[in-house]
Amino acid sequence: MDKPIAKGEKTRLRFLKREDVDAMLRWDRHDDPLLATYNMPKLGPRQREDWYRARTRRADFRIFVILDRASNVVGRLSIREIDNRKRRARLGIALDPALVGQGLGTDAVTAFLTFYFEQLRFEELVLDVAAHNVRARRCYEKCGFHYSRERWQKDTALGGRLGLAIFTDERFRGVRKFFRQTGSGLEVLHCDMHITREQHLRARESARRPVGRGGGLSI
């Protein structure tokens, strides 16, 4: 359980342990209400055990923690909807809000992709991300994910906290285009993204290829 399953330049990943839940509950919290769903829920002692068991005893779900160079728990990464027949799963990731913007997420996802495709031999990894979460989208783009489609999804969290403030509060002026009000309530624009094993291996090979005399650049 202590052995890393993947290593990056800034991070390493291993399977979740019970004490990691306590560490994640000590993280800062997102002040931006649009990112509040990434905050850890407030859990009592019994609830912490239940949270851990619910995420470590499912056949279609795997969860890992992201550690920094000092072995601090700085994030969590999961795959869900694991389909062993199609060799596909869905990615999820969250970081300590105090550490966002330091490249830890990009480093961890990049390292995980090598484990996922080259050791586990999966064929595709998919994800969905809210269009207003530009930072997350850029992370996934850097890691080699491609856009599949955009779709509107009924909101199940933000509307209850923010209501129509999305359309009236100046804090949200830059992201209003990613929301719409319908007869059934607030909807949020989401982006579906994916990366295949072939795409990952091709990008890895291009990154390793030395710059030729003709001036070509590797990505």
Image (tube, rainbow, N blue to C red):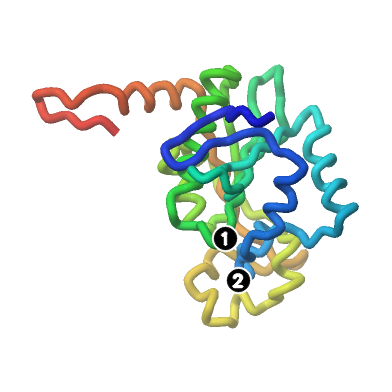
Determine whether, in the image, residue 118 is placed left or right of residue 155: left
- Which kind of residue does numbered mark 2 sit on? Asp
Read off the residue under disc 1. 97
Q: Residue at x 73, y 73 (%)?
A: 161
Point out the image quarter for the C terminus: top left
Residue 208 falls in image quadrant: top left
Residue at disc 1, secondary structure: helix
Residue 64: percent from left, percent from top: 65, 37
Q: Residue at x 58, y 30 (%)?
A: 4
Determine whether, in the image, residue 47 is placed left or right of residue 153: right
Residue at disc 2, secondary structure: loop
Read off the residue under disc 2. 31
Q: Residues within 10 Å of mark 2 (few under 14, many from 20)?
A: few
Q: Residues within 10 Å of mark 1 (few under 14, many from 20)?
A: some
- Which kind of residue does numbered mark 1 sit on? Pro
**Residue pushed farthest right?**
46
Point out the image quarter for the N terminus: top right
Towards the viewer: 218 or 18: 18
Query: Where is 170 relative to 10, above or below?
Result: below
Towards the viewer: 115 or 212: 115
**Cβ–Cβ under 8 Å for marks 2 and 1:** yes
